[in-house]
Image (cartoon, rainbow, N blue to C red):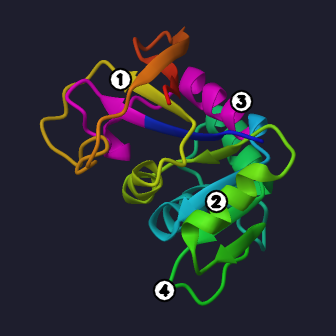
Amino acid sequence: MRPLRYSINVTLDGCVDHREGIADDDLHRHAVENIKWADALLFGRVIYEMMESAWRAPAQTGVMPEWMEDWGLPFARAIDVAKKYVVSSTLERVDWHAELVRGDLETFVRRLKEEPGRGVLVCGVRFPLALAEMGLIDEYEFVVHPRVAGHGPTLLAGLSKRLDLRLVERVEFGSGAVAMRYDVRR
């Protein structure tokens, strides 16, 4: 059974707004390792559309946008070719190496986890909350940035039950960010 890992950037005050993190080569290299570890990425509609608009290579030219730093290219390449599952009731179709998922989410995710492989990676804010409520997430990785944002959205806001976790890995980055990976204590 392959684990489902939730990875999210978070500030010291719990903000998970992607614009509040410290983007640098260390953190993107770590994100590339996560993507390469996973056999598939599991996205809700919002994160899929956000990632596609930011990281998908333009079809006509194959050239990445001018705003992208060189250290972002390995991340863009890794996410571009990764297998993606997109859970949405509003999208009519997806591409970008993606498959649209509809219907019973819990059944689909349990089946996905039962397939052979290394793991499945999920990110985002609202969609992972639904997975956490169902008890489907096996590993939580919080990349904590040395910043206080002073606004939300906040990490797993609205979770109806406590999560007990066990630290299994800790990685420090030059920016002062720290990635901490936890297993769920069942």
Q: Nearer the viewer, mark 4 or mark 2?
A: 2
Residue located 42% across and 17% down the image: 177
Which type of secondary structure does the marked residue at label 4 adopt? Answer: loop
Lower position in the chain sequence, tag 4 or tag 2: 4
Q: Nearer the viewer, residue 71 or 42?
A: 42
Please name the residue that numbered disc 1 is placed on: 145
Residue 40 location (% of width, % of height)? 74, 52
Q: Nearer the viewer, mark 2 or mark 1?
A: 2
Residue 56 in view here: yes
How far apart are the alpha carbons under marks 2 and 1? 30 Å
Residue type, mark 1 in image = His
How far apart are the alpha carbons under marks 4 and 2? 19 Å
Lower position in the chain sequence, tag 2 or tag 1: 2
Please name the residue that numbered disc 2 is placed on: 109
Q: Is residue 82 left or right of residue 186?
A: right
Above or below: residue 129 compared with residue 98: above
Q: Which mark is residue 90?
A: 4
Lower position in the chain sequence, tag 3 or tag 1: 3
Which type of secondary structure does the marked residue at label 2 adopt? Answer: helix
Lower position in the chain sequence, tag 3 or tag 2: 3
Q: Which residues are magenta?
A: 9-35
Residue type, mark 3 in image = Glu
Residue 44 location (% of width, % of height)? 51, 65
| Mark 1 crowdedness (10 Å alpha carbons): few <14, some 14-19, many ≥20 | many
Please name the residue that numbered disc 3 is placed on: 33
Residue 63 in view here: no
Residue 120 location (% of width, % of height)? 69, 46
Residue located 19% across and 46% down the image: 152
Q: Is residue 71 left or right of residue 136?
A: right
Q: Is residue 179 left or right of residue 77?
A: left
